[in-house]
């Protein structure tokens, strides 16, 4: 998990041919942050979009494994360290 200011985000990746990238975006207190826009961008520029639910959970399904992605949380209110973050 990474932290900065008032927000924390977590990225979990499971290795397989197609994976689900999922996690939770929270305040330092541990409560989830709802309705944040998230992007997962591959090296060819294809962008996947997700939004956090009321508990701060998000999920990107059917993501091809073995590639490098840029993960970003987009918010006007919150700031996050290591945002965007490159994951492999």
Image (cartoon, helix red, strand yellow):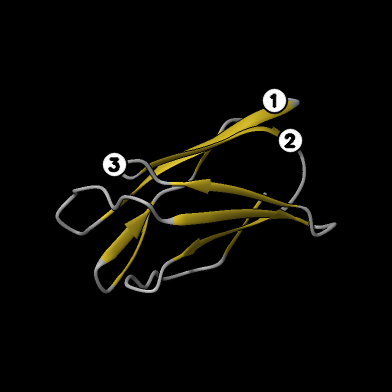
Residue 82 point in image, percent of width and height: 48, 69
At 39% from the left and 74% from the top, the residue drawn is 76
26 left or right of 76 in image: left
Mark 2 in CB contact with mark 1 (< 8 angstroms): yes
Residue at image point 14% right, 55% down: 29
Q: Mark 3 points at which residue?
A: 54
Tell me where residue 27 appears, x and y as whole percent.
23, 58
- Mark 3 surroundings within 10 Å by alpha-carbon count, few (fewer than 14), some (14 through 19), many (20 or more): few
- Where does label 1 land, which residue? 16
Q: Residues within 10 Å of mark 2 (few under 14, many from 20)?
A: some
For the residues bearing labels 1 and 3, Cβ distance under 8 angstroms: no
Q: Dot 3: what SS?
A: loop
Q: In this view, does 10 lie above or below 63?
A: below
Nearest to N terminus: mark 1 or mark 3 = 1
Left or right: 49 in relation to 77: right
Q: How far apart are marks 2 and 1 (CA)?
A: 6 Å
The answer for how far apart the CA atoms under marks 3 and 2 are is 28 Å
- Measured in 3D between alpha carbons, the distance from the residue under mark 1 to the one under mark 3, in whole angstroms, is 28 Å
- Helix, strand or loop at label 2? It is loop
Mark 2 highlights which residue? 65
Residue 80 rendering spot, x and y as whole percentages = 39, 69
Q: Is residue 29 above or below residue 67?
A: below
Query: Going 37% across and 52% down the picture, which residue do you hit?
Result: 35
Residue 21 occupies quadrant: top right
* Relative depth, front residue between 2 and 54: 54
Sequence order check, earlier mark of 3 and 2: 3
């Amino acid at each position: 998990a990474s932290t900065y200011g008032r927000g924390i985000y977590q990225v979990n990746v499971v290795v397989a041919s197609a994976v689900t990238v999922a996690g939770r975006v929270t305040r330092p207190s541990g409560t989830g942050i709802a309705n944040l826009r998230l992007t997962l961008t591959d090296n060819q520029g294809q962008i996947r979009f997700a939004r956090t639910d009321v508990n701060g959970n998000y999920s990107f399904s059917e993501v091809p494994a073995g590639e490098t992605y840029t993960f970003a949380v987009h918010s006007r209110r919150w700031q996050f360290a290591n945002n965007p973050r490159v994951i492999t």
